[in-house]
Image: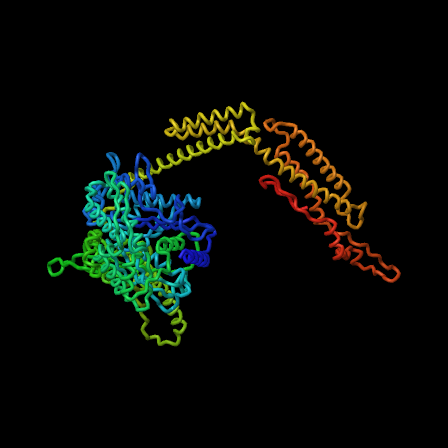
Amino acid sequence: MALKHKMYGVWCLVMLAALWSPPADGAAVISIDLGSEWLKIGIVSPGVPMEIVLNKESKRKTPAVVAFRDGVRTFGEDAVTVGVRFPKNSYKYLLDLLGKTYDHPLVQAYKERFPYYEIVESARGTPEFVHDENTRFTPEELVAQFLAKAKDFAEINHGQQISECVITVPGYFNQAERRAMKEAAGLAGLTVLQLINDYTAIGINYGIFRRKEINDTPWQALFFDMGAGSTKAALVEYKNVKVKDRGYVETVPQMQVLGVAYDRTLGGFEITLRLREHLIKAWEAQGGGDVRASPRAMEKLLLEAERLKIVLSANTEHYAQIESLLDDKDFKHFVSRAELDSLCADLWPRVSSVLTRAAAAGGATSAARLVLAGGAARVPAVLGLLKEQGYEPSRSINADEAVAMGAVYRAASLATGYKVAPLNVKDAVLLPVQVVFTRHVDGADKLIKRTLFSPMNPYPQKKVITFNKHTDDFSFNVNYAELDHIPPSELPNIGSLNLTQVVLSGVGAALHKHTGDNVEHKGIKAHFNMDDSGILNLVNVEFVAEKTVTEDDKDSTLSKLGSTISKLFGSDEAEKTEEKEEKAPEAEKNETANANEAGDKLNATEPEAKPKPKIVVLKEPIKTDEQVLVLQPLTQEQFKASKTKISELDAIDRKRAERESALNSLEAFVVDAQMKMDMKEFSECGTPEQIEEVKKLCSETSEWLYEDGYEAPTELYEEKLALIKEKTNTIFYKHWEHRERPDAIAALRSMLNTSNEFLKSAKNFTQEVNPEKDMFTQVEITVLEKKIEETQAWLDKSIKEQNALKKNEEIKLTIDSVREKMGGLDREVKYLVNKMKIWRPKKPIKKENKTEETIEVTDEIKEGKVEESVEKPVVEENQEEEIKEEVEATETPQLGDGKDEHSEL
C-alpha cells in the first residue's frame, strides 16, 4: 500500500510538471480547504509546482481547532490538547455556524452537541461565543483566524508574502454563507480569487490528470464525497468544446457539473457522536457516574470515539480505553464493527439516497465512473452500500488532498503570471433563484414570479429580466424557489428563502423623458450576474427604448443624446446595434452616389427613393436601493472592529514567538558555552581567567532562567545573550583559527607546488629559450618566480612564529593572511595563463623570387589602394599537442569556506 501511494505521488508530480509552466514573474497563491475537522493548504509559487503546505509539525493537514488559554492562542494539535483539558476554550466545527442567524436550526443543533459553550445572539442576529467577560468571538472572526493561520503556514514554508487565494466551500452554501466566508477572508488579509465548490475542485483535480482522455466524446464521473460534517455527490461531464478567446476559436477540455445532491448532517462526525453515546451508556452501565455533567470527560469520550471509529474501519473489533475518565476511574469497553453498523442503521439509507439523487439530477449513464473522496467514505458499510448501487468505487485520487489540489490549480489559472493547461469549468446552480414582483391588473395587484436561475443552470452566467408593464417606481424581490429537488428535511437548513429587495426610483421620469410618436418603450431591464464564486450580484437596472429616425433628423439633439447614453450605459449588444447604425448611412451615401452616376439613364419623372428608417437604442439608468433580507453584511465599523480584534491577537502571537525564540536562543547558547568551556580544545584558547569568567556567567544565567527568568521580557534575554557572546567570541574565534589553519596551510602549499610546476614549464616559452614560442617575457617569469619565493619564505617564517605561541595568545598566522597570500599568487599565475591562451605564433616570413616574378606598378598601387596580402598563422597539430604536454593545466585548491575561487593554471 505504501509503495502504491508513493508511485501515485511520483505520477502526480510528473503530470503536474507537464501541465504547469513556471511563471516569468508572479506572486505565490494558495488554496485553502477548510473543512469541519481539517485544514489543508495548497500552494503554487514561482519555480515551484503545486504542492501541499506543511504545518509546523511537518504534517500535510491540521486540525481545524483554535484554543485560548492564559493569553496564549494555539492552533491544530496544540489546540486539541488544550481542548481536552479546557473544552470551553477550544473552538471547532465552525462551518455549521458561518453566515447563519442565531435561530437557525443548525445553530441550535450545535448548541445541543456542545453544551459547554456559551453562545448568545449578537447585534447582527448571528451567534456569538462568550469567551470571557471582555471578549466575544463571532464565527466569522474565528474562521478568519484559521484562514490567517493558513496564510502564515504558507509564508513560513515558502518565504513569500501571500495575498491571494482560492477558498473551497460546500456546494450547498447559500448566498449569506458565501458572503460570510469572503468577509472572513477579508479579516484575514486575503483577497479571494474565487470561492469554489468542493466537488468542483475534486472534478478539476480528477480532470487535469486525465486530459488525454478528454475528447469530443463526452464521458462522466460521479464523485462521492463523505466528509466529517456532510455528504455530497456530483455528476460531472468531461468533453472538448470550442471557445472564442481574443478573436480566435480554439478547442479546450471542459468539465461541467450536471447534477448535485447532498445531505448536510450526514458525515463522519455523526457516526462519532453515536459511538460516543454508546460509550456513555456503557460507562453508566458500569456505575461510573454522571459523565455528561463533566465537559472534560465528554471531550475525552469524543476523542476516543473518533479513534475507535477509525480503527474499526480496518478491524472488526477493538477496545475503547480511557485513563482517569471521571473521578480517577479508568474506562475500558469492547466494541465490534457490527455494533457500530447497528448504531448507524438509519444513516445508511441516506448514503444511498445522496448518490441516487445526484445521478438522477444529471442523467448519469451506465458508464459513469464512481470516484470516492472524503475520510468517512472509508467506512466499510458505506463502501458496501455504494457497491450495491451497481458501482465499483474507485480511489484513483488522493481522498484527503483532492479538494486542495484542484483548488490550487484553479488559483494558478486565475492568478497573474501563471500559465496552466486550459480547463474550462462550468459549475451548476444548486439553489434556484427567482424574481418576484407585483403588477396592477384589472384593478388589483397580481403577484408575478419569474425564474432567474433554474436548478443545475451552469454558472458563471449573466441574466437579464425585463419589466415591460411598469410606468412608475416599483420594487421586486429576489428569492430562492423551485426547491423540489431538495429533500424536505434539508429545506429548514437553507434558512430564509428571501434574499434581497430592490426598490427602483426614477422610472416615471425616465419614461417621460423618452416619449414621442417614433419612440417605442422596451421596458425596465435588470441585469444580474452569478459570478464564479456562486454569489448573485445585481449589476445595474436601466430603462431601454428604441427611437426610429430618418436621414433628415438623424443628427437631432435627441438622437445625439440617445447615442451618448447608449455608449455610456449600453451592453455589448447595444454597442453592436449602434455600430450597425453608424455604418448604415455610409452605405446609403454609396448607394446615392451610384444612383447619381447612373442618373442620365433614369427617367427624369421617376420618384426619388426614400431613405430607410434607422433604429437608435436609448438607455437611461434607473436608481436602485438593494436591501439584503437574510443577514446583513458587516458594516464598515463592524469590519474594522473585528479586524482590530484579530490584529491584536496576531500582535500578541508575534511578541510571544519573539520572546520564545529569544529564550530558546539564550538557553541553547548557555548550555553550549558551558560544555565547550570544559573541553580542552576550547579551554586552551582562553586564559584561565577568561574561562572562569565565562563559566561563572553561564552558571548565573542558567540559575536565573530556572528561577525568575521565564517571566522576563524579550529585551532582557537578548541583553544577556549579547553579554555571553561578547565574553566567548575571542575564545571561539581562536579555536576556529587553530582548527582551520592546517587546511589553509595545506591549500597554500599545494598552490605553491602547482605554481612552481607552471613556472618550470613557462621558462621554456621565452624569447631566449624558444624564439618560435615566445609566450612570456623574461620580466614576467622573474616576477612570478619572485612572488613564489616571497610567499614560500613568508609561510615558513609565519609557521615558525605561530608554533612558538600558545593557543590563547594573539594569532600571528591567520586564515585571512593565508587567503591574502593565495590571492596575490593566484593573480600572477592567472595573468600568465590568460596570456598563454591568447598567444598565436608569429607569421612566417615568405621569401619572394624576384628573378621570376615581376610586379607591374599600376595606378592603384601608387595610390595605396591595394591591400597587402596577409597570411593567417597556422598552428600545426603536432605543435599544439606539444604545447599541451609542456604546460599541463592544473586546478588550484580552494581554501576555507570556498569564497576565494582560483582559475585553472
Of residues 458 and 372, which is closer to you in this image? 372
Q: Residue furthest left?
A: 443
Query: Can the viewer see residue 231?
Result: yes
Q: Residue furthest right?
A: 851
Judge left or right: residue 485 versus residue 207: left
Q: Which percent across, then down, holds residue 636?
A: 28, 41
Q: Residue at x 37, y 51 (%)?
A: 31
Relative vertical location of residue 489 with respect to residue 817 in this rendering, above or below: below
Relative vertical location of residue 452 with respect to residue 678 in this rendering, above or below: below
Query: Can the viewer see residue 512?
Result: no
Judge left or right: residue 88 versus residue 423: left
Count of numbered tags: 0
Q: Which percent across, then down, holds residue 148?
A: 35, 43
Of residues 759 and 480, which is closer to you in this image? 759
- Figure quadrant of residue 486: bottom left
Of residues 883 and 313, which is closer to you in this image? 313
Give the colour scheme of this rendering. Answer: rainbow
- Figure quadrant of residue 553: bottom left
Q: Residue at x 86, y 59 (%)?
A: 849
Q: Please state, as top left, top right, bottom left or bottom right, where the N terminus lies in the image.
A: bottom left
Q: Which percent across, then down, holds residue 894?
A: 62, 42
Q: Which percent across, then down, holds residue 550?
A: 30, 64
